[in-house]
Amino acid sequence: MTEPSKSSLADKLRSLGVRIGAADMHVKTNPKTNVPIQSVVEGRFVSTRQGETFIAEQTWPPDYRHGLTPLRTSVPLLTMAQWAGDERLTDLPLETFAFLDTETSGLAGGTGTYAFLVGVGRFEGETFRLVQFFMRDPSEEAALLEGLMDFLAPCAALVTFNGKAFDAPLLVTRYSLHSLPVPFEDFAHLDLLPLARRLWRDRLPSRALKYLEENVLAAPRTVEEVPGYEIPYIYFDYLRTGDAAPLKGVFYHNAMDIVALAALMNHMASILHAPFDGQVQHGLDFIALAKLFEDLGRVEEAARLYERGLEVGGSEADFGAAVQRLSALQRRRGDLESAATLWQKAAAEGHVYAHVELAKYYEHRRRDYAEALKLTHSAEELVGLLDIPRYETRHWMEELKHRRERLEDKLRRSRHE
C-alpha cells in the first residue's frame, strides 16, 4: 500500500470541478504529452467479462533470493498460524497463497479512493509469478477487478502488509460498487505488519515494509524506486496529461513490495519455526520472540528464548525488561534456580537488574539477608556509573534505598533471634 498523502485523488478532482463517477473520469489524450502505458511497462491487454484491462507480468526463478532470503517458504506455518489465530494457514498449500498490494489514489477511503494498480503474486510450482493489473482510465475499474478475480480463483489465502486495515477493505468497497463478488471474502488473511511490529518494534526505528526489506532482508531497492507518498500524485498527473512515463517507478515500487512480502513471510516463518538455527542474531530479537511465545502459552520455548537473548546482550533497559519477564516466567515454572544462574552471569557483566533480581532471590528464596544486602549495595554503586537520565537514576536509587533499609532491618532482627 502507499504511504499517507495529504489528499486523495478524489479531493483534487472535486477542487477542479470534476465529477467523481468513473464514467466521468478519463485520461487526457493530448498528442504532445500522451505516452501510453504499454510503451513504458512491458505488458499486454487482456479481455475480461467487464472489458479490457492492462497487465504486466514477471516471474522469479526458484533459486532467486531477495537479499539473503529465498521467496518460497519451506517450513511449516504452525506458529504463524497460531499467532494469526487461523488454523487454516497450517494446512493450505503454498501455491494457494496470494501476495497482494495496491497502489491507490489516496488513503481517504470510501468511494472516492481508487486502487489504480493492484499487484498480486503466487507460486506456480517453484516459480513465483507476479501480475500487476493497471487501470489506464477509471472507466476500466470493473475490468481490473474482474481480471483480479480470475487470478485469485485458485487461491485460498491472502498475504498483505497492513492489508486488513487498508487494501482489503478498499477492494471490498470497489467490488461492492460494481456489484461484483469479492474474490477473497472467505480467504485466510495473513497481515504481516502486526507481526513485524511484534518482532522488531524494540530494535528497529521503523517497521515500514521498505525499511524491513533493507534492514532485515538485506535487499535495498534500486534508483527506480519512488516514494510511496508521491504515488497518488503521479497517477493524478497521468490522468491529467496522459504521460505514463513516470508510472514506471510506481510499477517497480509495487512489484518490490510484493516480492518483499513473499521473502518476509519466509523469513518470519523460519525464525518462528526454528529460532535457534542462526538466523536470529540480535538479543532484542530473541527477547521479542520470547514475548510472542510466552503470549502463545509456549512457556518452555519462551524461557529458552529469554535466556538466549540475555546471553547475547543488550542495553541495561532492554536487559532489565527481559529479566523481569523471565523472572515471572520462571516463577510460574517453579525454576528459579535456572534463573539465578543466568542472573549471576549477568551480574558479573555489570547489569544492575541482575544484582536486583539476585538480591530478591537471596532475600526471599534463600533467606540470606547478608548476601541480598551485599548485592543491593553493588546495585547502588552500579547505578551511579550508568549513563542514564537523572529521573531514571532517582527511580533506581529510591527503589534500592527502600530495599537496603528493609534488608538491614531484617538482618538486625535475624541476629537477635
Image: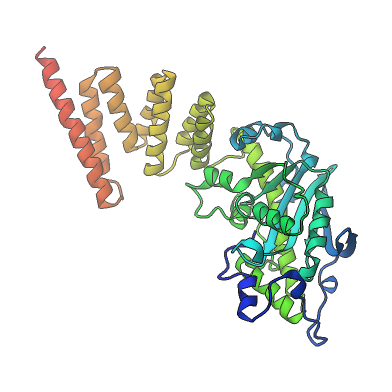
In the figure, residue 359 lies in which quadrant?
Answer: top left
Q: Position of residue 333 (x, y in %)?
A: 44, 20
* Residue in the picture at 70% in, 35% down: 89
Q: Position of residue 290 (x, y in %)?
A: 51, 34
* Residue in the picture at 58% in, 39% down: 280
Q: Is residue 337 above or below residue 41?
A: above
Image side of residue 53 versus residue 71, left or right? right
Q: Position of residue 138 (x, y in %)?
A: 76, 69
* Quarter placement of the N terminus: bottom right
Q: How many marks?
A: 0
In the figure, residue 411 lies in which quadrant?
Answer: top left
* Residue in the picture at 11% in, 18% down: 413
Q: Is residue 280 above or below residue 161?
A: above
* Residue in the picture at 20% in, 22% down: 370
Q: Nearer the viewer, residue 397 or 45?
A: 45
Q: Position of residue 262 (x, y in %)?
A: 71, 47
Looking at this rendering, what residue extends furthest in the front direction? 179
Q: Is residue 411 above or below residue 386?
A: above
